[in-house]
Image: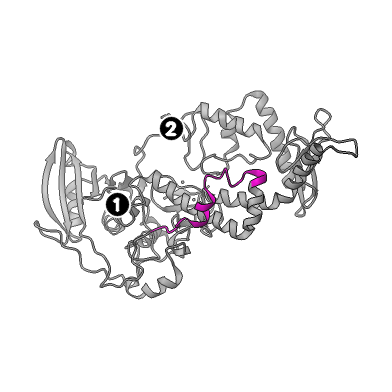
Amino acid sequence: MSEAENSATVLIPDKNKKKTLCGSCEIELEPDHPGIQCIQAHHYCVECSARIVNLFFSEPQHYTPLRCVQCHVELIPEVFERQLTPEQLEFYLQHMLVLLWAKEVVGEDERLDRCPFCNYAVVRKIDDVKFIDCRHSECGTFSCLVCRKACPRYTSPYLTDEQFAELDHHFKCSRLHDNKQEFERYLEAGQKVPCPNCGLAGMKDDSCTHMTCPQCSQLWCYFCGKKVEDCDKARNGTNGIYDHNLRWETNLQRCPMYLIQLNDVDKRWEVDEDQCLALFHRLRLLRLLREAFEKIGREDIDELDRHFNIVSTCGFTIDEILHEDLTLIRNRPAQFSKAQTIYMALQLTLSCDLDKSQTGPTLIHSTGVQHYKIPPEVIQILQQNLSNDRLSDDSEGVLCQDNPQRVLGVLRSNGFTLQKQTTDTNKALWTLVQGGGSGGHPAPPPPTDENNADTGAEDQGENNEEGGEGEGEGEGEGEEEGEGEE
């Protein structure tokens, strides 16, 4: 992607847009609070950070490397270390040293096994038994590496029924280990979406679906999980990933810029970004768990659940996993052409404080749309005619640092008509309609995006509402490490 194209697609975030809240208890935090922060801007207060520390020390082998409990992105070690007491820090450094050492000495056909009860570790063959006999002088525990519980030592060759059942339980752990790991991988993958270029995964915040990977700088779409280069876009478009959002309501290969826009065509999606994100990941996780059932097999899944309660505690019933409708967007036309495309009269409202009507800033939002979000077509107009560094995303649309007259002039020169001008308490308001006079809201003429005319039939082969890659699932889909939000 060219530098010019990239610079034309960036909206500068509004630094004052929202408060910093703890990701666990949701209390408001100071920007420089001392608690845990991940690079995807998930924050935790000191008290909740202490609980995360305790979680790590409950099973350090399982929680190394350290990850954010929301997006599972690896934490910067220094951020975690400053939460520790001197005693905890000593224990923590011992385990990290073992981890670093393992990366240097463990071969491809080997694994590092660590005692669940101390810092003893040993390198063994990758297919060795899933038990460890700790040789630490102060521990000496014989334990199962799958359930991470202590196993009894029996000196007599003659076992009671209870002793045999307990031993058999741990041998079953070893036999089910691979299927357990496979199922857990699907569970983890459902909570985040990976970068399609480098695989770094995480969860977006409440902003748009445009993602920039902090590791490889790949620009991609969170909804369909595709690189910007692979996304379907308006033909001859010059606005990068924004062209992937044009007329998504009728083009099965396009994706919405904001999840809350889905409410316009599918009322299952609430007009709330957090609820929309939860629904997106619910559908994604159910789809992945359905794949897990198909890959592992129902009989083996049932045995896993009887032994580890792994399905019973995943948050879904087996009926939901196997039978729930996983269509991401319902009510989208299956076929369309230029003549069938739905055009909606676009009405905008500009607002500005009365005492700043000569200087700005000016807020621009869509009138009559619950979530106020500005369509990509209008964003493109603003970016092409105003300085991009004076535009920022806002909870109610787009905030422009220019004065209202400057913004009005740009919109009027691009097909908008001023319908009325009013004042409301301390605000000045301007209402504009696209292509219409003062009396009605006629729709704009059909767009020249030829993609809509000639890809309708192709869409049906490449996409399906149940879960095609173009419909935006993100499995191969690759998820505010993550991903940086654009």
Residue drawn at (82%, 32%) of the image: 140
Numbered circles on residues, count: 2
Q: Which residues are magenta?
A: 306-329
- Name the element at disc 2: loop
The amino acid beneath tag 2 is Glu
Identify the residue at the far left of this view. 439
The residue nearer to you, when weighing 161 against 335, is 161
The circle on residue 26 is 2
Determine which quarter of the picture holds residue 262: bottom left
Determine which quarter of the picture holds residue 170: top right
Q: Which residue is mark 1?
A: 387
The residue nearer to you, when weighing 298 against 329, is 298
**60 relative to 414 in the view: left or right:** right
Identify the residue at the far front of this view. 161
Mark 1 vs mark 2, foreground winner is 2
Specify whether residue 351 is painted magenta. Answer: no
- Name the element at disc 1: loop
